[in-house]
Amino acid sequence: MRLLETEAAARLGEALRGFRRAALSAVYGPETTAAADRGDYRALLARCGDDALGVWTRLFVVGVPVPRDAASKAFAPFGIDEALACGLLVGGEEVSAGWGAQFEGDRLLFSDQLPNTTGGRTREHVLGIGGASKLLMDATLRTPVGSALDLGTGCGVQALALAGHASTVTATDLSERAVAFADLNATVNGAALELLRGDLLAPVAGRRFDLVVANPPFVIGTPGPGWTYRDGGREADGIAAELAAASADLLNPGGTMQFLANWLHVAGEDWAERVAGWFPDESVRVWVVEREKLDPLDYVRTWLRDSGEDHDADQAAAWLDWFEAQRVEGVGFGFVSVRRVEGPTEVCCEEARHSVETPWRDRVEDWFAVRARDLEPETLWQAKLRVADGVVLQQTAAIGEEGWDVDRQWLQQADGMRYAEELDPLVVQFMGGCNGEAEVRLQVQLLADTYGAEPAMLYAQLYPVIRGLVERGFLV
Ligand SMILES: C[S@@+](CC[C@H](N)C(=O)[O-])C[C@H]1O[C@@H](n2cnc3c(N)ncnc32)[C@H](O)[C@@H]1O
């Protein structure tokens, strides 16, 4: 299935070359476009003229109809009859957008309709660029690579971004319509993608890549027919488990896989153990960050609202019954980053609900960089550590008989992961001496002298704490 032949898609891309976010901002002003981004189209509509940019903007940004003649001029040399035949436009004397069109960087991407245009969703609806797409874009490492893979490409948003820094990009999707949109968008934006249709990993069986990304259909446990963009056809959190299990075999040595996922919190079970158990025993280093956790009712309501089925009490009840039968207490959502390494697998799962400095890719890079270092006890013993920039010590104190009595002390990072970490007084004292000049060995000996302790014993006690502080970026 193709939405347009390559030659026609290239002509459409040529016709719409001037339709980009930068042009909108330059012509209508950044405040007007910022208001439109928030869903307030009043100023934009008032400023749209009858020129081509005004016509495209009314059709695809605001989502209102325009006279057929005006559209015909705006799309030339792409024909109005071609636009009506492929579904880009619908109507008669007045025409409206049949597809959605969105900007991503300096690209224009078509998809099925967006919420601000007319019409409902079909089961094979091809999503435009949504919140989850943007999260993954923000987290994806952008260092140049040889080969990249986008699993569940939809309209091709991730794949086209990968094309900016990967020599070859492969993109897969189960949906024929999604592959057709990705193909069209590649041509419209002058990029080359290898597009394969099929179920999850099947189209790339036996192949390895330097970078793999996926914003998969991760929604859990939907009874009923399902939505291709959302429900991957696996039970429970099976999609994430399958991706995790395949990670080592999908990656070249040193390669990275990044995906978004939902996972279950089951009564009596540790979510971190559940997720860690999905990975192979060898060859991957994994960072799983849970950004939010919804209880089953909020989860079901969120996704029923998303698909416009929030009125469907039977479906909500069936979904909630399923969660209850599985003893599900909540559903976690977060980022999974996997690097192929030599040796046994290491998985770190953590909850980070607070606001973190973006882009997320910097956090991912930092995380892997520090874990690639030698942080063994003998190495840290000789290291000259210093407190990282932007780290402060905060204290609370209660008034006692002899004045203020400090009862809690914790470190707070101003940037990066913005971690806060509670410390005991010994570690506070140790960190106070971390000025980048004295070796850890010397500091531990001084502390041991102060407390009349044996240095080796004290170091054995402090080492895991010091290592944790280095891994979490408090000490460098
Ligand atoms: C949430 S959308 C993500 C689209 C796009 N990559 C993005 O970031 O916006 C998930 C995509 O996975 C596709 N999909 C659903 N089930 C699949 C399966 N079993 N195997 C491969 N792709 C699947 C859907 O058609 C949809 O395009």
Image (tube, rainbow, N blue to C red):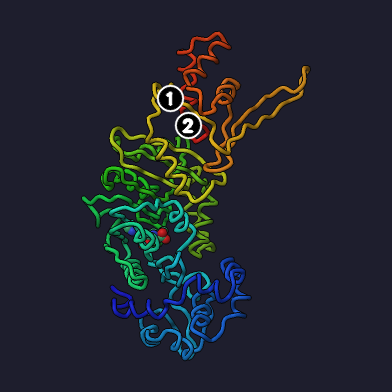
Q: In this view of the protein, can residue 224 be seen by the observer?
A: no
Q: Residues within 10 Å of mark 2 (few under 14, many from 20)?
A: many
Q: Position of residue 167 (x, y in %)?
A: 29, 58
- Which residue is label 2 attached to? 470
> For the point 44% across and 69% down, which residue is it?
121
Q: Is residue 248 above or below residue 306?
A: above
**What is the quadrant of residue 450 in the picture?**
top right
Residue type, mark 2 in image: Val
Q: Nearer the viewer, residue 412 or 69?
A: 412
Q: Position of residue 252 (x, y in %)?
A: 26, 46
For residue 419, which quarter of the picture?
Answer: top right
Q: Amino acid at mark 1?
A: Leu
Left or right, 23 with respect to 80, comes to: right
Between 308 and 470, which is closer to the camera in this rendering? Answer: 470
Q: Is residue 451 above or below residue 386?
A: above
Please provide percent x and percent y for residue 282. Answer: 28, 35
- Say which mark, if any, is on residue 380: 1
Sequence-first tag of 1 and 2: 1
